[in-house]
Image (cartoon, helix red, strand yellow):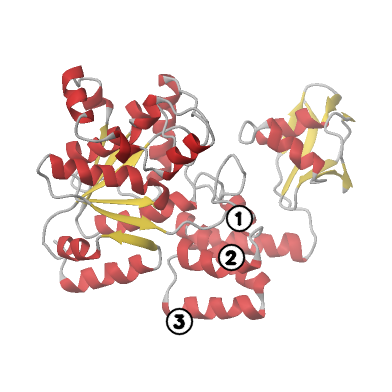
Amino acid sequence: MTNPDAAQKINTMFARTTDEILSLKEWEKLLNSGKKLRIKYGVDVTAPYLHTGHAVNLWMMRSLQDLGHKVIFLVGDFTTQIGDPTGKNKTRPIISQKDIERNTQKFIEQAEMILRFDDPELLEIRKNSEWFNKMPMGEFLKLLSLVTHNKLISREMFRQRIKNHEDLYMHELIYPILQGYDSVVLESDLTIIGSDQLFNEMIGRFYQEKFGQTPQVIITTKITPGVDGGEKQSKSLGNYIGLGHSPRDKFGITMRLPDNLIQVYLEVYTDISGKRLDELCQLVKSNPLEAKKQLAKEIVRRYHGEEVACHEYSWFNRTFSQGKVPKDIPYIKVEKDLVTALDMVIKFFDGTESKSYIRKLFMQGAIKCNGNKIDDFKQTIEITSDMIFSVGKRKWFKVCLK
């Protein structure tokens, strides 16, 4: 299904975002086989958000969809109830079925910004509760009998827990088995993942061989620091560019990026290439601020189109270069003429940010009223006309009584 020219184009495109291929020989054979590939994309829906780090994998899958290959969008509704321990030194909390269903819908809405959901030949939605809810205990025990305890605890994260005398629960230990068996049921040819999922998907290859299938090729993708230059993008750390963020937020959050990460983000999170990419990488050295604005514009363009990207670029320049308060800021209506600063900012965010995150904004001096900092989030504000609040450097709102 993939001709030699298309295969070469795919490999060139993937090189920018690929960390490792297991194995390269298998991948080249698979890509040139003429087979319609089944690409496993498994997600646990513990939280209803995706960010540009997740999107790296999605864009790679979309390029394969465009060549006629099929993405199997696997909602891990069963495994979500267990909780993947990947990257965690503590047991993850169990999530309710209601939250799983809500998060699944939100997840799909965001994935639709990239993947093609409009053609059943290119995308199929499955849930792993289809097989795990029906699996007899005897069959499950047979599945366990194929893998040794030593193989499972060879995982670095588990070994670290044991070394630190921290609890390691049995449901966490068998999680890789469940994720691995998904690959058997779906007859996966390929999975594209972050490197933190490699152990689980290697178990998938292991089980596919045990069940007489050709083991899936695994492509791991590059993981970059978050926009604060620290750990990888995470909602809990507030250092991510979310697919669900507005174009204005995507632009503004990108502008927080340290200069030394501009080039990496250009390569990993945009689709510009060739001469244009080279020009922007050179611009990083001579004018990092403008290079960062171009990066922000490209990220917005990729998800919202050229017109929106140009508008946000112009808005940012007007607002920050000229120091003007935007004209289109929202009104927050309050019922009382006396309200705490914390309650007012919480109302502005409307549930999109946690109370702890908002308190941090106050402590960092990021909240201002008519240009004056509000350090104490418990401070009572008397509502008057023409009150303009700013949150950081890129969010404003006005307050009025209902």
Residue 381 coordinates in the image, percent (x, y): 88, 30
Task: Please name the residue shown 44% across and 70% down the image.
Answer: 272
Q: Within the image, what quadrant is residue 168 found in?
A: top left
Q: In the orientation shown, which residue stands out farthest toward the top?
A: 137
- Position of the N terminus, as image quadrant, is bottom left
Location of mark 2 (residue): 261
* 142 shown above or below 244: above
Give the numbered dot on residue 227: 1
Residue 178 coordinates in the image, percent (x, y): 28, 32
Structural distance between the alpha carbons of marks 1 and 2 = 8 Å
Task: Please name the residue shown 58% across and 67% down the image.
Answer: 262
Left or right: residue 223 versus residue 341 is left
Residue 253 coordinates in the image, percent (x, y): 63, 54
* 275 shown above or below 68: below
Lower position in the chain sequence, tag 1 or tag 2? 1
What is the three-letter code of the residue carrying label 2?
Leu
Left or right: residue 130 versus residue 322 is left
What is the three-letter code of the residue carrying label 3?
Lys
Structural distance between the alpha carbons of marks 1 and 3 = 25 Å
1 and 2 marks in contact (CB < 8 Å): yes
Task: Please name the residue shown 61% across and 35% down the image.
Answer: 352
Which marked residue is nearer to the observer: mark 1 or mark 3? 1
1 and 3 marks in contact (CB < 8 Å): no
- Position of the C terminus, as image quadrant, is top right
What is the three-letter code of the residue carrying label 1?
Val
Give the secondary structure at mark 1: loop
Location of mark 3 (residue): 275
